[in-house]
Each structure stands twice: as structure tokens, then as C-alpha cells.
Amino acid sequence: MLGTRSTAFEPVTAIPAPIQGPQPRVRASRKLPDLANPVLEPAFTAPGAQEASCEIFNARIPQPIASDRVTECSIAGIQAFADWEDPLHPWQRLRARLPESPCTFGAEDVMPDKPISIRVSGLAIVVKLWRQFTGRTVGRTEHSDLGFALWERAHWISVAAVEQWLQQLSDRIGSDTPEYLGTEAAWRAYNKARNLRADRLRLQIPKRFWVWCTPDASGKIKCPAEILLKPSMLQYSFETLTWAPSTAAWTAEVVDLDARQIWRNCWVGLPAEHPFSTTFAPCNPSVTLFVPEGSTREEVGADIVVNPALRQPHVTAPWVQEFSDARAQAAADASAAADSPSDASSARTPIPTADQADVQVELGATAPAQARLDDLADLATTAEI
């Protein structure tokens, strides 16, 4: 059964869309710190939350990379991938599609540009982190590169694959040539900056945010665990989601990667398939549907297939029936249109008589017309950053 606390399972490497049936809980790698394990058993109270969490973590796990995989690189390609402030960078394009407000808690009082002190607590500190993770920073104490670091974690270029390419380049043209030295320097600079960002991100999410959302030794919790499911920012995976480009055009290749593996960007391109949409939102009428910028509620809702493993008494969101009725009506209209004679076959043009030769008979046909968890903001006021 979904959500049980058994350790007898195997991680899922690929989940079809839409996600169907029970999903086993992902098992932490030995490489993970003990700090990650409590997040596998968060203090969820809302129906569908634990199931959605399982599906998200099970989908977003590292893909195997062959030990002999080589990643071609160039100075221009590395610098373009590292230039996250470029409006055309894949991260910036993705960021522009993230919803302008959270889906699991309200932030109206401090959005869009109200400064938040580093000494605040409760909901405000959660919003302060969320703004940084989505690139909507305000003031000197918020840092936009944390959002890029979160995206980078889901697109972590394999060090081994790059090192093998550099070795091949050195063997081919020499380790003292300008091309080799420049390429190696560009990679070293990017990799160093990437690791520093990853360290800062680790401090903010596993060591702070996750801790706030899990019970302490006394059983108290500072933030409702359901906040961990918010789809308005990328999820922090337990391990880096490594990949190895095959060409030096990393920024172009990552776009193709995301099209094939939509879970890397947390289903922003296909919001109807996000476990938040299929498993959590149907059970919680007060949460906002996950609708990225450029999409509409109707477009997203029409494509959502509610997880059939959910208990029917828990599926209480009104929009589920709303969009179900709309789909049924659309199907009925399509069936009626298919059963009715077409304009061409129903039209009967009489043979004109001599005095009716110029008379044109036109027949027209008219087709049938087609027709927030109650503010998860009850946070304790002891969390500080």
C-alpha cells in the first residue's frame, strides 16, 4: 500500500505519465546524510501528501551513466552553460514559467517586492527562501543564484565524462596548447563555482528547510510538511541528477534532455502530470492548482488524470468533477458530431429546370456548441535564518 513505512522495495527509475497505481517509497542512498532520512517519513497530515511525495522522489533519481561516457566541451559551451543570468539560458526560460505565487501557502503580504529581514520567523522566512529558489529576490540578503543551483542540481554534468574528454584533448593536441589550457580553465572555474553554490543550497534546504518541516526530538514541527510539495519551485532531489552531454553545445542539449525527462524540471512543461496535480491537489480543495505562466487553469485541469490509487472519499476537490464533466460533455459533442450527417452528404442539389438554371440551393448545418490548504501558514515562530 502506498505510504507504508516498509523498507522492502526497489527505487523506480522511470514512471510513466500519468503516474498510475501505488509507488514504493524511494530508499536513501548510503551516500546521503542521515539528515535526508526524516524527509522520507515527513509528518504529513493532508490526504494524498505522502503518496505525492513518494511519486516525486521516486521519479527524480539519478540515471546511470556509462563509465566510458565522454562529454565534449569547449570554452564557449562551458561559459554559456555557466552564464545563468543570460535571459536565454534554459534556467531563465524555465524560471519565467514558474507560478508567481506558491501553491501550498499564501505570500500576498510580502509579495512581490517587500523586503524580509533575516531575523523573521514563521511563514515570512519560508517566503524568503522560496523567492530565492525561484529567482524573485528582493534586497541584499536574498541570492538569485540559489535558484540556479537548484536547477543545476537536476542537470549536474558528470565530472568523470568531462575529465575523460580533457584527457583525450590533451593526448591529441597537447596539455600546453592554448585550446587545452583555456578549456580546462573554463571547466575548473565552472565546477568550482558549481560546488560552492551546491554547498550553500545544501545549507538552506536539507539543513534548514527540511529540518523545519520534520518533527524535532519533542515532536514539534515548525512548518507544515505539506509545504515540501509546493510545485512553484524545483524540488531538491536526494542526490544530484547527473547527465553527460554528447556535444559541446550543452545549453542546446539540455533543452532536448528536459523534453525527454520532464521530471528534471519538476513537470513544469507538463503540469497536469505533476504528482501534485494528480495525487495531492485532488484531495485538498483549498490548494491552488499548479498552473505555470503561459498556461491556463482550464488547459491544465482538462489534462489531469487523477491517480486511481487514491481513496475515493479523499478526492474532494470540486475541480475534479468540474473537469470530468467538461471532458464528458466534449466526448458527447464529438460523438454527436460523428453520428450526424456531414454537410456535404446531407446537401441535396436539385436538378435545375430551364427557368431555374441560375438558382443555387445552399443548405447549412449548425454543429452542436460545446458548451490553499487552509493557509498552511499556521507556522511556528521560531524558525530563523
Image: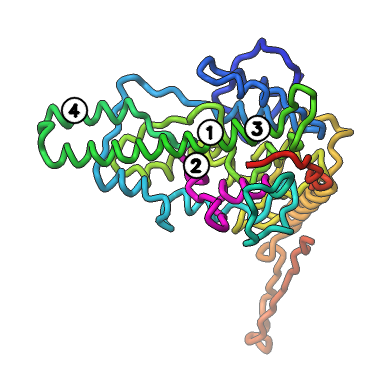
Q: Would you say 87 lies left or right of 296 here?
A: left
For this rendering, which residue is in front, 304 or 367?
Answer: 304
Q: How far apart are marks 3 and 2 (CA)?
A: 18 Å
Mark nearest the camera among 1 and 4 is 1
Circle 4: is it few (<14), some (14-19), or many (20+) Cα within 10 Å? Answer: some
Residue at numbered disc 3: 210
Which disc number belongs to residue 106? none
Which disc number belongs to residue 202? 1
Q: Is residue 306 visible?
A: no
For this rendering, which residue is in front, 381 or 337?
Answer: 381
* Residue found 37% across the figure and 29% down from its top: 158
Q: Are marks 2 and 4 in contact (CB under 8 Å)?
A: no
Residue range of the region highlighted in magenta in the rendering: 125-152
Circle 1: is it few (<14), some (14-19), or many (20+) Cα within 10 Å? Answer: some
Which callout, 2 or 4, points at the residue further toward the start of the chain?
2
Q: How far apart are marks 1 and 4 (CA)?
A: 33 Å
Which callout, 1 or 3, points at the residue further toward the start of the chain?
1
Residue at numbered disc 2: 151
* Residue found 71% across the figure and 33% down from its top: 213
Image location of residue 254, percent across then percent down: 41, 42
Instruction: Check disc 2 and report its element: helix, strand or loop.
Output: helix
For this rendering, which residue is in front, 184 or 119?
Answer: 119
Which callout, 1 or 4, points at the residue further toward the start of the chain?
4
Mark nearest the camera among 1 and 2 is 1
The amino acid at mark 3 is: Trp
Residue at numbered disc 4: 168
Q: Do the residues labelled 1 and 3 touch (CB within 8 Å)?
A: no
- Asked if 194 appears above or below 329 in the picture, the reply is above
